[in-house]
Image (cartoon, rainbow, N blue to C red):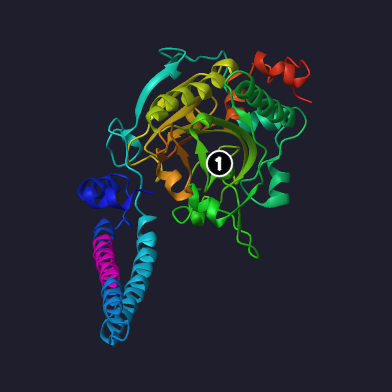
Amino acid sequence: MLDVKFIAENAQAVRENALRKNERRADVDAVVRLYEQKKKLQQDVDAARARINALSEEIAALKKKDPKADVSAPQAESKAVKESIRQREEEMKALERRLEDLLQWIPNLAHESVPVAPDARGNVVVRTWPEGFSPAARRFDFAPKPHWDLGRDLGILDEERSAKLSGSNFLLLKGAGALLERALINFMLDLHIREHGYVEIWPPYLANRASMYGTGQIPKLEEDMYRLRDDELWLIPTAEVPVTNLHRDEILPHARLPIYYTSYTACFRREAGAYSKDTRGMQRIHQFDKVEMVKLVRPERSWDELESLTGNAEEVLRRLGLPYRVVLLSTGDMSFASAKTYDLEAWAPGLDKWLEVSSCSNFTDFQARRLNMRFRDADGKVRFVHTLNGSGLALPRTVIAILENYQQADGSVVVPEALRPYMHGLPAIRPA
């Protein structure tokens, strides 16, 4: 969350930022009003405590002058002042609770480099790979199939049985399809660990309310999450939640920064109301696999770290030989907690569209304030860390891109060179 003092001092900028992020529940005026009330109460409490100290000195001086002196009047006043302090502190606690409720709806400030626009139409393509790539130039000697047809013909995707097991929008891969999924996970983890310097984390798939709140999933996105009915636990929507929470309520020594973590988990999202399109095949499902990258860094390094993080995700796509583009999200399309986000989109020729396979974001100190996650600098000053995360990559859209880009006229799909060591040397997936 944002610092309440900063909000009070920059109310207009915070108000405009909330509107640009389409966050209509952000009540900046109420936050400022409650903050001023709390400040006034604190001033009253400080003045009252000073009065108690003065009365104590007055009582001591009277008794020193005359042990039998009548001090009932200053003692009575002191008692009354103490009661007023107690009442004001109760008022302050109530104000703090109301402030907390309001602050959780104030979005993070978008970086000045983020394009201002109401929705995804304002996003900006930063670069493509290969350089200058155009979908129009991606030609086949045959009509490319969408992945659901490829998956069915190859015998690796079974939509009917997945629906029988769990309902619509769930995934069932088998044989070489399951092997491809597992190969991608292991390939990405090895790349991030061995070459990019990340430490692997294997976290729980269930998170408590404090964890979900800390990274900003609730209350903003609560309706999109799966919650256990009998426990105050949620199925994680991404490894970002448990991994970023690892150092919640800690003060890290400055020498430990930066910290890079990577983690494979299954991810679970209800995505209520999001199924008006893109429902066929593996494009948008309730449970999917993802390798996540999380960074905890010094504030002055976070923007460089965002570029590095994005580059780590891009390297996965390049080694897989998948055409992609990097898109800078506009204010109206970026997340509540992010200050700047790049999406990586792989080209899917069977679908004739770009598919988001990674989202890389800098949250500045927004999550760290919710998490109370700080570090002690060399000068002894305690500061909030900056948090970043990115998909490196998300599946199964990466699987879609592989199937559709590497399909052959005979119905087979060539296995990318980088994945063959993870698929027992299999050069291609062929119909069973």
Please identify the quarter of the rendering in which residue 49 is found: bottom left
Q: Is residue 296 above or below residue 35?
A: above
Q: Position of residue 235 (x, y in %)?
A: 62, 51
* Quadrant housing the C terminus: top right
Q: Measuring 44% from the left and 22% from the top, which residue is drawn there?
A: 325
Find out whether residue 35 is within the magenta segment. yes
- Does residue 221 belong to the magenta stretch? no
Residue 233 is left or right of residue 15, and the answer is right
Question: Most extreme residue toward the left, as rendered?
Answer: 12
Residue 80 sits in quarter = bottom left
**Chain part drawn in magenta:** 34-54
Residue 419: x and y in percent read: 68, 19
**Residue at coordinates 53% horizontally, 47% vertically from top-left?**
248
Give the percent coordinates (x, y) of residue 259.
54, 31
Q: Observer-nearest residue: 135 or 13?
A: 13
Q: Is residue 30 left or right of residue 102?
A: left
Say which of 332 and 1 sits in front: 1
**Which SS type dominates the magenta stretch?**
helix
Compare residues 226 and 280 and report the one nearer the observer.
Answer: 226
Q: Is residue 48 left or right of residue 216?
A: left
Residue type at numbered disc 1 = Arg
Category of crowding for the residue at label 1, using alpha-carbon neighbours closer than 10 angstroms: few (below 14), some (14–19), many (at least 20):
many
Residue name at image x 49 percent, y 15 percent = 138
The residue indicated by pointer 1 is 284
- When the figure is inspected, residue 416 is found, relative to residue 20, above or below; the finding is above
Q: Secondary structure at mark 1?
A: loop
Q: Is residue 356 visible?
A: no
- Give 6 or 56, whichever is nearer the viewer: 56
Q: Is 413 drawn above or below residue 221 in the view shown? A: above
Percent position of residue 395, x then y: 60, 33
